[in-house]
Image: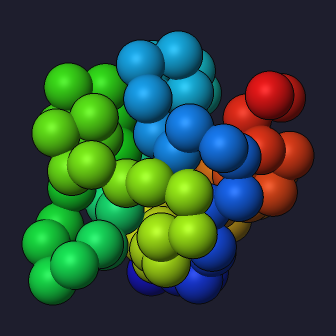
Amino acid sequence: MVQKHFTIKNAQGFHMRPATNFATAMAAYPCAVTIKFNGRDVNAKSPMFIMAACIKVGSEIDVVCDGEGENEALAAAAALIESGFGE
């Protein structure tokens, strides 16, 4: 299991486009990917669950990857989040 802490910096947070792009990217990895936010565990392979979590700009989250390909998945998650989802 690997994890990393992030602060969401894109202006709209995890709205529909970044949530979908993030979930699609994470679905390419066989490991479990979870976003920990406000005491909840969110399935990071589901855009609907990500949007339902209401993760806004400035929110602090942890991304946890567990299983085969966990390091690669965390690196991909970090690249997306740190780039502000390209927005």
Residue located 31% across and 26% down the image: 47
**Residue 80 in view (yes/no):** no
| Image vertical order of residue 34 relative to residue 58, above or below | above
Residue 57: % across, % down:
56, 57
Color theme of the render: rainbow
Residue located 77% across and 44% down the image: 84
Left or right, residue 81 beside residue 14: right
Where the N terminus falls, by quadrant? bottom left
Residue 61: % across, % down:
45, 74
Residue sitting nearer the eye, 69 or 35:
35
Left or right, residue 78 beside residue 68: right
The quarter of the displayed image where residue 49 is located: top left
| Image vertical order of residue 41 relative to residue 25, above or below | below
Residue 12: % across, % down:
56, 38
The quarter of the displayed image where residue 15 is located: top left
Residue located 44% across and 54% down the image: 56
Left or right, residue 47 beside residue 65: left
| Image vertical order of residue 83 relative to residue 42, above or below | above
**Residue 84 in view (yes/no):** yes
Residue sitting nearer the eye, 67 or 60:
60
The quarter of the displayed image where residue 9 is located: bottom right
